[in-house]
Image (cartoon, grey):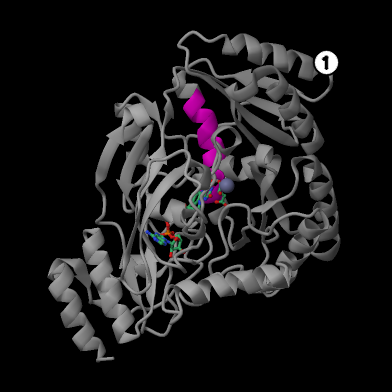
Amino acid sequence: MGTMSELVQALEQVVGKAGLVLDPALMGSYLSDWRNAYRGRAALVVRPGSTEEVASVVRLCHDAGVALVPQGGNTGLCGGSIPDDSGQQVVLSLTRMTRIRNVDPANETITVEAGVILQHLQEAAAEAGRLFPLSLGAEGSCTVGGNLATNAGGTAVLRYGNMRDLTLGLEVVLPDGRIWNGLRGLRKDNTGYDLKHLFIGSEGTLGIITAAVLKLYPAIHSRTTAWVALPSPQAAVELIGRMRALCGDRLTGFELMSRQSVEFVLRHVAGCTDPFAEVHPWYVLIQLSDTLPDAPLAQMLENGLGSAFEAGEALDAVVASSEAQVDALWAIREGISEAQNHEGPSLKHDISVPVSCIPAFVEAADLRLQQAFPGVRIVAYGHVGDGNLHYNISKPTGSDDAPFKAQAEAIMGLIYDVTLEFDGSISAEHGIGQAKREAAHHYKAPLELELMRSLKQALDPTGLMNPGKVL
Ligand code: FAD
Ligand code: MLT
Ligand code: ZN
């Protein structure tokens, strides 16, 4: 084990001067997250440009006993990509690894490096006449490596699954610097434990993902989008069942939003306007898609909504009549995260419960929260077809930040308790990071935690891979 300056010299041999950030004044964007909710310090930031460079960097840090924090686009919401405040950790940024290595339309696969931005991956798939379906608000800056490491979800999981479901193979640099080449584009491979699934969702605690073979799907040639007002989450659950029965896999998006969520967007996101003149308690954004250019989607939507009105599930609806209107409706949905930031400190949640339990979850959590913490603003929205709600909480209007922050633990505990009463999960898509580490210890089964620790010990015995995250 040498000194930090010896490590810096050795790293410079691998990545060159341009691949290192040593000046704390230039490190800012690597040391805090998108919401500025987490801040850390680092000895340096290293930006390797190839898998071999990543392997050398990891080996050098391993031999020097220095901890690594992998980082992609730094859009994660649980502080997983932020170093601690010791100033001793090294941030390993994958943002220079941006190659699309291979597109194989006949195998319906694309092989990309970890630093490829999700939107660029979607564009590369489109150029090949295919669809890469993962879609989320941060797609303009999040990376494939971060999507894999958090098993990202988003708005198309309903039809296509989350990142785990979209992955066939991985290349990973192990904590000791060895390279595991698992870049197989196989849909069938039963040769023992499926190792890629260990790394997907491991939030950088088991190794550095450097590349992946991902699934492609047929391109979409027609879509129809509607914004529907509803009386309750119960109506949303009934409506999604109705639409799915009618449209099958053509139902590709179904996002629920409370009035509070939409109000925040109307207040803070430029260009967003209320699709209705009247105020309604809940809304869903429905999207139907098809590979045929002239699929009868509008007719299907009309049939579904017609019977929903008769059943009292829908109160009002607008169907987008142009691509600009489609974008305008999605802008309201995708604007909620940003809008909530303008309303002061907030507590973000990404809980999941069985879809059938969503209405009872909302009712129970709303009631208990308003009794225990009167005035807090509940910003509930999300991927209702996946049973995944962002049951976020903003401080009461006009109140100081400090009392709200002091109640944060108790508010989160209340929400997690209700989640567990419905056999749910405290994190459906954002992961544990540092934000939910204590909660995971409390809410996960002891045997599950023990098995997770055994895996961590087997793969990262020196504990240098993103320490303090997840476990
Ligand atoms: P980072 O934030 O850089 O890292 C995330 C985690 O992955 C960290 O623990 C990090 O150490 C690890 N990591 C990063 N790269 C690697 C690598 N190559 N190898 C190993 N570990 C690595 N998430 C959803 O699931 N669904 C959503 O709908 C959604 N919407 C969002 C909307 C907004 C506006 C924002 C800001 C975030 C949203 N997210 C959503 C959060 C989501 O997790 C990320 O945006 C994305 O998946 C993280 O990618 P990233 O490249 O930014 O990763
Ligand atoms: C989303 O679905 O918009 C994000 O996952 C939620 C968030 O930013 O909390
Ligand atoms: Zn989400």
Three-letter residue code for mark 1: Glu
Answer above or below: position of 159 versus 348: above
Q: Kindly indicate the quadrant of the structure image that contains residue 156.
A: top right
Answer above or below: position of 282 versus 46: above
User: Does the magenta segment cover residue 333?
Assistant: yes
The rendered magenta stretch, by its main secondary structure, is classed as: helix
Q: Which residues are magenta?
A: 326-339
Depth check, front residue: 85 or 262: 85
- Does residue 301 appear to the left or right of 422 in the view shown? left
Q: Kindly indicate the quadrant of the structure image that contains residue 343.
A: bottom right
| Residue at image location 79% in from the left, 40% down from the top | 356
Depth check, front residue: 42 or 321: 42
- Does residue 211 appear to the left or right of 202 in the view shown? left
Depth check, front residue: 186 or 62: 186
- Residue 347 horizontal/vertical position (percent): 63, 61
- Residue 37 horizontal/vertical position (percent): 51, 67
Name the image quarter holding the C terminus.
bottom right
Name the image quarter holding the N terminus.
bottom left
Mark 1 neighbour class, 10 Å CA radius: few under 14, some 14 to 19, many 20 or more:
few
User: Does the magenta segment cover residue 259?
Assistant: no
Answer above or below: position of 405 versus 190: below
- Residue 413 horizontal/vertical position (percent): 74, 67
Q: Kindly indicate the quadrant of the structure image that contains residue 25.
A: bottom left
Mark 1, secondary structure of its residue: helix
Depth check, front residue: 82 or 334: 82
Q: According to the image, label 1 marks what residue?
A: 310
- Residue 253 horizontal/vertical position (percent): 59, 31
